[in-house]
Image (cartoon, rainbow, N blue to C red):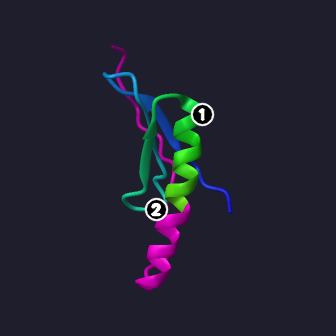
Amino acid sequence: MKFTITIYQDEEGWYVVECPAIPGCMSQGKTEEDAMENIREAIKLCLEVRKEKRLPVTIKSEEIEVLVPAL
């Protein structure tokens, strides 16, 4: 399966990764590569738990456009 993720570097330099399609599925790593490896494992574990609890595998995710005034 393929999932969209978000990744950013926090104030302490850690890379934080989230999978918005799976509620609560996030991880981190000291390097971007570590964070990517960790989110793969987190996704697998989250999917297993959701299956065990008979929850939907993912939630609906959409892209919207928001007009923002010039800053």
Tell me what residue is drawn at x 58 percent, y 52 percent. 40
Relative placement, left or right, of 27 versus 71 is right
Front residue of this view, candidates 1 and 43: 43
> Which residue is found at the position 49% from the left and 36% from the top?
7
Range of residues picked out in magenta = 44-71
Residue 10 rendering spot, x and y as whole percentages: 35, 27
Q: Tell me the element at label 2.
A: loop
Residue that numbered label 1 is attached to:
33
Return the residue nearer the eye: 68 or 41. Answer: 41
Residue 47 lies, in percent from the top left, at 52, 70
Extreme residue toward the top, this view: 71
Q: Is residue 58 visible?
A: no
Residue 8's place in the image compared with 4, above or below, is: above
> Left or right: where does residue 68 sit relative to residue 7?
left
Tag on residue 54?
none
In magenta stretch: residue 52? yes
On the rendered image, what quadrant is the N terminus found in?
bottom right
Quadrant assignment for the C terminus: top left
Task: Say which residue label 2 marks.
Answer: 22
Give the Cα distance between marks 2 and 1. Answer: 21 Å
Q: Is mark 1 on a helix, strand or loop?
A: helix
Magenta segment main secondary structure:
loop
The mark total stands at 2
Amino acid marked by disc 2: Ile
The residue at the point 42 percent across, 50 percent down is 26
Residue at the (32%, 22%) spot, across then down? 12
